[in-house]
Amino acid sequence: MSPGALANRTFRHWSLLPAVFLFAVLTLYPLVNLVRMSVSTIEFTQGTEDWRFTPRANFAQLAADDVLRPALVNTLIFVAVSVAAEIVIGLALAIAVAGLSRGKQWVRTAMILPILVPPVAIGSMWKLMYNYDFGIFNQALTAVGAMPVNWLGSTQLALGSVIVVDIWHWVPFVFLILFAAVEGLPVDLLEAARVDGATRSQVVWRIMIPLLRPAIVVAFLFRSILAFKVFDEVFLLTSGGPGTATELVNLHLYKVFFEQNQLGYGALLSLAVIAAIVAFLMVARRASAAVQAR
Amino acid sequence: MRLREIFARAAAPGAQAALPEIAHGGWAGRALVAAALFAVIGPFLWILTASFKYQIAIYSGQFPFTPTLSNYTDVLFGRRSDFAANIGNSVLVAVISTIAVLVVGTLAAYSLRRFRWPAWVSGGFLGWTLVFHMVPVLTLIGPWYIAFRSLGLYDTRAALVLTHVTINLPMTVWLMSAFLREIPREVEEAARVDGCTPLDAFVHVIMPLAVPGLIAAGILAFIFSWNEFPIALSLTSRQTATVPVAIARFAQQYETQHAQMAAASVLSTIPAVLLMFVGQRFIVRGLTLGAVK
C-alpha cells in the first residue's frame, strides 16, 4: 500500500470517529441505560445510588398516572393548533412580503429576531404582557372599560394564551422558509398566467400555493417536531398550571425526574415518548414522500 | 418541483424582479405586513421599557416614566445576584461547545461525503442524528444525570459543554455537508495531485472554501447553546447556572421579580441582536438549508 493510501485510510477513520464516539457515549449509551432505568427504582441514600428491579411497579405507575392523559391531550392540541396557525399566517405573510416592491430585507431582519433570542426571554416577555395587574392586554382592556382577564391563571384560557406565544415565536421561522420558496418560484410561469387573463388571486391560489406545496410540507414537518419539543416558554409562563391546564409531556417528564425524583418511572416515560416520535417519523416520511411525488 | 431547484433560483440575484408585481397584495397585503412587524417588534419594546422602570412604575403601569438603570445594576452587580457569573458561564460554555462542534461536525460531514463508507455506517449515522434531533432532550436527561453524577461531572460546565456539543452535532453535520457539497471535487483532486496528504488537503484547501458554512453553523450553534434551557436547568446549580436558568430563577421565586427579570432578559438577547445585524445572510442560509435538506 502506498503511503498516500495509508494516510488516506487513517484520516478516513479518524475523521468520523469523534462524532461517532460522542454519539455513542452521550446518546446511545444513555438510551441503553434508559431501558435499564425504566424497570428499576433508583434512590440516592447518603450519596450512593440504590437500584432495585421493579418493572411491575413502574408499569403500574404508568397506568395510574393521572397527569399523563391531560399532558398528552394538551400537547396534541398545542402542536395541532399552533402549527396550523403558524403555517397559515407564515404563508400569507411570505406572499405579502414577496409582493412588496421595497423593504423586503428589513422585514426579514425583524423576523429573524424571535427565532434567535432565548426562549426563556420570550417567556418572561409574555409573562409581563399577560400579567393580570399591569400587563399590556389588561391595561388595554381596562382603558376601554372592559374587565381584566386572567390570561395565564384561568383554566379555560391558559392553554390558548400559551399557544399564542408559540405562534408569535415561530411564525417568523415558517415565514423564512416559505418566503425563500416564494422568491424561488418560476416567475415566467406566473407572468404567463397573468397574460392569459388570470386574476392575482387566481395566480396565488391556483398556481403559487400548489407550487409551494413541497416547502409547506417541509415547514409543517419541522414545526410539528419542534412544537412537540416545547418546554422553555411554558415552564416560565405557567409551569403546567393552573391545575393541569397547560401540562405538557415535556413538563411532566421534567417534574417526574427532578421534582418527584422518580428516575425509574421517568425513564419509562422517556422511552414511551421516544417510541412515539420514531413512529411519527416513520409515518411522516411515508406521507411526505407521497405528497412530494404527486 | 424539487425543493432544491426553487431555493437555487431564489439565490440567483435579479431573476425575480417581476415577482412583486405578480404577488402584489394591495392594501390588504401591506396591512398584513405592517401588523406582523408591529406584533414582532412590540413585545421587545415593551420589555425594553419595563427594564428601565422602577418596580413600582411597572406595577402602576406609569407612562411616561422616569427611566432608571437600577434594574441593570441590581442584576449585574447586586450582592444577591449571580448574573455576572451566569453570563461568564454562558459565554464559556457557548464558545467552547461551538468550537468543538464545528471541528467534530465538519470532520464527520467531510468524511461521510469524501470517503466511501458502507451504507450501514453513513445511513446509520445520519439516521441516528435525525432521530436524536427530533427527540425532546428531556428524555435523555435522566440517564445524563446519573452518568454525570457517577463521573463527578454533575453541576460542572464540562457537562454542559459535552451535552451542548451533542445536541448541536446533527445540525452542524447537515449544514456542513450541504456546504461541502458545493465545493467541486476537482479542487481537492488537484491538491492531491500536487502532493497534499488528505489531511493537508482538508485543512488548506477545503476549509478555506467552507468558511461561509462554518460561519453559518457556528452562529447557529453558538445561539442554540446560549439559549439552551432544559439541560442547564437540570444539570447545574447556583455556581454553574447559565443565563436562561438565572432568568427562570427571577421569574420563579416566591414573588416574581419583574423588573430584574426584564433587565436580565434584555441582556440575554444581546448576542441575538448583534448576530441578527452582522450575520443575517448566514443565519437565513443556515435556517433554510437545514429545512431543505
Image: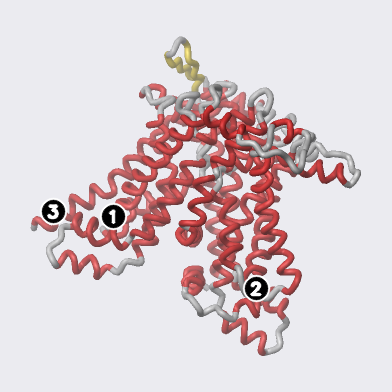
- In this view, the residue farthest toward the left is A2
Q: Is residue B130 above or below residue B233?
A: below
User: Mark 1: few, some, or many residues within 10 Å (few <14, many ≥20)?
Assistant: many
The kind of residue tagged 2 is Gly
- Of B239 and B81, nearer the camera is B81
Q: Which residue matches tag 1?
A: B111
Q: Quadrant of residue A262?
A: top right
The kind of residue tagged 1 is Ser
Q: Which residue matches tag 3?
A: A6
Q: Which residue matches tag 2?
A: A99
Have a look at marks 1 and 3 and say if they share a chain: no
User: Mark 3: few, some, or many residues within 10 Å (few <14, many ≥20)?
Assistant: few
User: Which residue is depicted at the point 48% across and 52% down?
Assistant: B275
Asked if the residues shown at circle 1 and circle 3 are in contact, with their CB atoms under 8 angstroms apart, the answer is no
Q: Position of residue B283 (x, y in %)?
A: 48, 57
User: Which residue is depicted at the point 91% across and 44% down?
Assistant: A145
Q: Position of residue A273 (x, y in %)?
A: 56, 38
Chain for disc number 2: A
